[in-house]
Image (cartoon, helix red, strand yellow):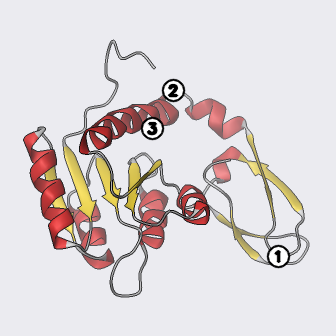
Amino acid sequence: MSHTLTQVIVTRILVVEDDRDEAEFLKKFLGEHGYEVQVARDAGQAHSAFIMNPPDFVLLDAILPNDVSGFEVCDRMKQSHAETPIVFLSGIELEDARDLALRVGADGYLLKPYDPNELLVMIRETADRVWQQVHLNADEAKSERVRFDCGECGRKLKVKGSHRGQRMNCPQCGASLTVPRRD
């Protein structure tokens, strides 16, 4: 992807991380690279920070305290602000975790430990990609069809792209489903 002009400028990053050392490292490192960083240590703080001072970008740990996972936090954030890029920083190396992150709307997944310079590149590239998806492909995305299977009965379903992230019931078995945000 060539960057003759950056489509989006990221200034405010919300870091959702319960490990104090990791959170402080990210705040200092990203601050040194010109970002304004707010740290939330759990889902409640993340929700408050996200609503009261909406960030341009979110870095999110998958495992959080108090029985609310990063996956749930991501899903809630994407339901209210689908255009905000969210990247998971996680120590969970399982493919199922990556798949779940994508299903709840995450725009990226970086495995801990990571190269801090790789994180900087990922922030820029992800922000640009999400901006382009939201602003340049919006009409195309709404007209496309989303194809997915019911997790209960296996029926193949097809709905409008504008229904991404919304809840529905399977017409065959009645199971409650969420239309995938990504294919």
First along the sequence among labels 2 and 1: 2
Q: CA distance from mark 2 to mark 3?
A: 10 Å
Element marked by disc 1: loop
| Rendered residue at 32%/54% (across/down) | 58
Relative to residue 119, is residue 40 drawn left or right? left
Relative to residue 182, is residue 41 drawn left or right? left
Mark 1 residue crowding within 10 angstroms, few (<14) / some (14–19) / many (20+):
few
Looking at the picture, tell me which residue is in the foreground, 90 or 36. 90
| Rendered residue at 29%/45% (across/down) | 115
Q: Position of residue 180 (x, y in %)?
A: 66, 56
Q: Is residue 111 above or below residue 7?
A: below
First along the sequence among labels 2 and 3: 3
Q: Nearer the viewer, mark 2 or mark 1?
A: 1
Q: Position of residue 60 (x, y in %)?
A: 35, 61
Element marked by disc 2: loop
Q: Which residue is mark 3?
A: 130
Element marked by disc 3: helix
| Rendered residue at 51%/26% (across/down) | 136
Q: Is residue 57 above or below residue 2?
A: below
Q: Amino acid at mark 2?
A: Leu
Numbered mark located on residue 136 in the image:
2
First along the sequence among labels 1 and 3: 3
Looking at the picture, tell me which residue is in the foreground, 172 or 182. 182
Mark 2 in CB contact with mark 3 (< 8 angstroms): no
Mark 1 in CB contact with mark 3 (< 8 angstroms): no
Q: CA distance from mark 1 to mark 3?
A: 31 Å
Q: Which residue is mark 1?
A: 152
